[in-house]
């Protein structure tokens, strides 16, 4: 491993990060899958399931804020673990990693926009049906 | 910008250097692309398809037109063509998208079968190109003259780099870079740039270099996740 990067093996069902935890690492999935979920209104809502090459945990690393979602391994999973220092070294030595991060983050914003639009549209439909005729 | 592709079957070729006075690629390439078309295989040109540092416009146009036409025939039959930019054709980036009616990408993450394969030209990991881009360009122009004496000074340059790394008890720069990319969850990394075709297994996975068509004719076949380095032999012989 180079410059502070480490590897981590996690078992099926093992929690990797939990909402509210302090965290200073991000993870790149080498093998296996990871389910990202968030507790909302008393239930666990699955936001996405990520596979090899995908990354997660970057929000806490980049913004120095607590974890925003839970991440749980689905099957035996191997992760590349990057802290702030090793991310900076990685970006210098592996310049396309930044472009891939931007590409994926852009995709996530697009998905969230579509979901927000749908939620607003559903809410508007609900309030319209509640209006007295 | 596309960086992801799903392909069951894909041919990867690199370093064609069309337009270079030393390039003998044109006729072999047209035949190879016809073979790809008839076998229904998509093609990825992994950088330095065209020569911009060591050429004349007349040589470039006489080499490029038959190959561009072959690529268009390939696409007309429903196959995809990916063009990744290298260090000798950076300035063509914007023209190529119009000429080829295909998308230009900085690199490609291919999913084939169960495998994840990274295809990239590889110049971003060449220490000379990264640290001294201006002197690299001047050197590449000067090497154009040396090419008239010896047809492939690039592979000699890559071999000198590898020997230098060995003296420092390190691995060649392309292998170090490939292993770094493999550590991000790729099964195979395919580079060009060095002109030296190779197929090696590194600590984190499989590294293949697609070699060159300046004088060579090596190519990589991706077939449902299986990656194999091959040498093109004329099918009409």
Image (cartoon, rainbow, N blue to C red):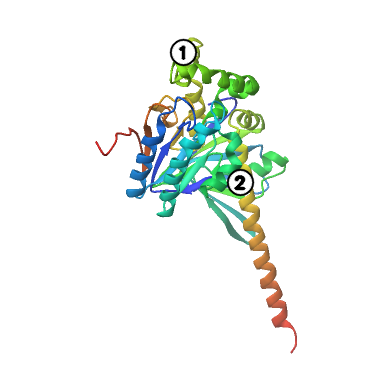
Q: Which of A116 and A68 is in front in this view?
A: A116
Residue at the spot 50% in from the left edge and 12% down from the top edge: B164
| Residue A103 - label | 2
**Residue A24 coordinates in the image, percent (x, y):** 66, 37
**Residue A80 coordinates in the image, percent (x, y):** 54, 35
Residue at the spot 35% in from the left edge and 50% down from the top edge: B40
In terms of image quadrants, where is residue B223? top left
Q: In this view, does B192 lie above or below A23?
A: above
Q: Is residue B149 above or below residue B20?
A: above
Report helix, strand or loop for mark 1. helix
**Quadrant location of the C terminus of chain A?**
bottom right
Q: Are marks 1 and 2 in contact (CB under 8 Å)?
A: no
Residue at the spot 33% in from the left edge and 44% down from the top edge: B35
Q: In this view, does A123 lie to the left or right of B58?
A: right
**Residue A34 coordinates in the image, percent (x, y):** 52, 48
The residue sitting at the left extreme is: B237
Q: Is residue B171 visible?
A: no
Mark 1, residue position = B163
Residue at the spot 42% in from the left edge and 38% down from the top edge: B12
Q: Can residue B53 be seen in this view?
A: yes
Residues packed near mark 2 inside 10 Å, few (<14), some (14 to 19) or many (20 plus)? some
């Amino acid at each position: 491993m180079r410059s502070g990067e480490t590897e981590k093996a996690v078992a099926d069902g093992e929690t990797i990060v939990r909402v509210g935890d302090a965290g200073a690492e991000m993870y790149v999935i080498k093998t296996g899958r990871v389910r990202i979920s968030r507790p909302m209104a008393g239930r666990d809502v699955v936001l996405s399931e990520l596979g090899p090459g995908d990354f997660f945990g970057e929000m806490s690393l980049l913004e120095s804020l607590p974890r925003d979602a839970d991440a749980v391994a689905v099957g035996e999973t191997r992760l590349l673990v990057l802290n702030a220092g090793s991310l900076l070294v990685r970006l210098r030595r592996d310049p396309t990693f930044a472009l891939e991060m931007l590409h994926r983050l852009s995709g996530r914003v697009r998905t969230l926009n579509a979901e927000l639009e749908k939620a607003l549209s559903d809410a508007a439909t609900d309030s319209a049906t509640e209006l007295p005729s | 910008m596309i960086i992801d592709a799903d392909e069951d079957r894909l041919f990867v070729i690199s370093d064609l250097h069309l337009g270079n006075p030393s390039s003998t690629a044109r006729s072999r390439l047209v035949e190879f692309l016809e073979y790809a078309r008839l076998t229904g295989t998509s093609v990825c040109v992994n950088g330095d398809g065209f020569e911009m540092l060591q050429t004349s416009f007349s040589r470039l146009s006489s080499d490029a037109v038959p190959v561009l036409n072959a690529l268009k025939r390939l696409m007309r039959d429903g196959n995809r063509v990916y063009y990744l930019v290298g260090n000798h054709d950076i300035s063509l980036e914007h023209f190529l998208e119009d000429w080829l009616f295909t998308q230009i990408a900085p690199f490609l993450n291919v999913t084939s079968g169960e495998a994840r394969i990274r295809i990239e030209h590889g110049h971003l990991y060449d220490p000379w190109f990264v640290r001294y881009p201006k002197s690299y360009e001047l050197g590449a122009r000067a090497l154009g003259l040396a090419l008239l004496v010896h047809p492939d000074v690039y592979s000699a340059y890559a071999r000198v780099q590898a020997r230098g790394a060995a003296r420092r008890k390190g691995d060649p720069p392309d292998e170090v870079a490939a292993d770094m990319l493999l550590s991000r969850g790729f099964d195979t990394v395919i580079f060009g740039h060095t002109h030296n075709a190779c197929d090696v297994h590194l600590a984190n996975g499989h590294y293949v270099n697609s070699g060159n068509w300046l004088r060579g004719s090596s190519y990589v076949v991706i077939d449902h996740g299986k990656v194999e380095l091959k040498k093109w032999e004329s099918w009409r012989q």
